[in-house]
Amino acid sequence: MKHATNASVMRTSNRKLILNLIRQNPVSRVELAEQTNLTRASVTQIIDELLDAGLVEAISTLEHGGLGRKRTLLALCHNARYVFGVNIRRRHCEVGVIDLYGEVLSQRILDVSGRTADDVIRQIADTILITKKELHLDDERILGIGISAPGPVDYKKGILLNPPNFAEWHNLPVGSLLSDLTGLETSLEKDTNSRALEEKYFGAARTISNFMLVQIDDGVGSGVIIRDRLYRGAHGMGTEIGHTSICYDGPMCSCGNRGCLETYLRIPALLKNTRFHSWNDLAHADLEMQAKDAGAIIDRAAEYLSAALVSAVNLYDLEKIILTGDIASCPSPLTERLNETIRQRVLNRSSLQDIPVIDSCSIAPVRTGAMAVLHEMFQD
């Protein structure tokens, strides 16, 4: 059942729409009216509010092809607002702060492995408060704390649920704990969703509307953007490609399903009983070893992953797939094998004019963490 949208909600939505367009490129009021289909009066009123709030600024530039004639464009103010980012991983986490352009102003790395979750949370909070003091940031200019963590998560309640191989953090209300300790609002997001948003805002997917990001390291996760918006599913726990089965009678997965992609493709499983201790070892092996041992592992990884990606392309009609995580340290042989296999097996082969699997190009862990809050500022 559809519900009517009240004027206040519509106004907030229009404000975010305009802010997001200004974020992407400096733009004039006339261009904003054309791109949004809002009246010039509505655009002017919203812009005046944004100028008063110090979120945007007017800049002058020469007209294209003009004779010294200038026009006024609107751009985001770099120092208008700040977002703290916390990127929690199984071995360590990054804590820092970014501006509205995604520039990292501060970053500290904290150990996670071998420590209690409570101890880590308290150190994260202390680090945020120290950074806030060092950079002289007042609360009025801080949008909040964005947190990215291994899924699954309850993003609405700010709770880590039961991420595999992360038992100490199960059912932890990390959002409310950090909020109580810092006095700042928090927003939690699954790490792969945050990475997909980061690629959309700042990385390889800025001009791509429909894509999947696949992260492969100690686990296998994914985030999906459809029509420029993060896809969550009915309960906010969708797009778990690591827990789609590629073998119905395969080994039991920690999630309770059989033959999950993650049981085959997580890097510890790929490297089990091999001479390589990490994917980085494999990536930097000498040519003879790469041709023999490493090549066989990459072939196996490509076969496992392509089985899932063909289904993903058929389900979502994706334009691109972005590969990230530790496995991306040796991307070229893997992406070449993946693209060859996907082209042969995907349903709509005529749509694959471009290479569907590409490498991520935006890695800033603090910004990854901050994306949950930054995204809320620019989109509903």
Image: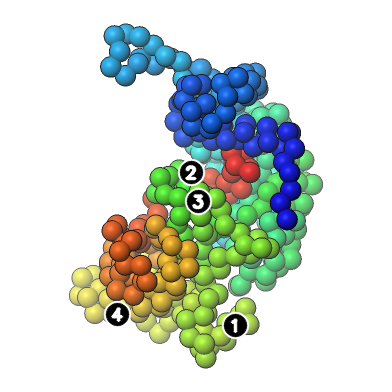
- Tag 2: residue type? Tyr
Residue at the image position 22 percent from the left and 75 percent from the top: 291
Q: Is residue 276 visible?
A: no
Relative to residue 4, is residue 307 drawn left or right? left
Residue 2 at x, y = what percent? 71, 51
In the picture, the disc for residue 201 is 2
- Residue 257 is labelled as 1
Instruction: Give the spatial CA distance, label 4 vs label 2.
Output: 36 Å
| Residue position for label 3 | 227
Relative to residue 200, is residue 281 depicted above or below? below
Q: As rendered, which of 347 and 16 lies closer to the eye?
A: 347
Residues at marks 2 and 3 touching, judged by CB atoms closer than 8 Å: no
The CA span between labels 1 and 3 is 30 Å
Work out whether mark 4 precedes mark 2 in sequence or the reverse, and give the earlier one: 2
Q: Nearer the viewer, mark 1 or mark 4?
A: 1
Distance from disc 1 to disc 4, alpha carbons, whole Å, reads: 27 Å
Which tag, 1 or 2, sits closer to the chain's start? 2
The answer for how far apart the CA atoms under marks 4 and 3 are is 37 Å
Q: Observer-nearest residue: 206 or 335?
A: 206
Mark 3 belongs to which amino acid?
A: Arg
Residue on which disc 4 sits: 296
In the displayed structure, does residue 168 sit left or right of residue 91? right
Q: Residue furthest left?
A: 288
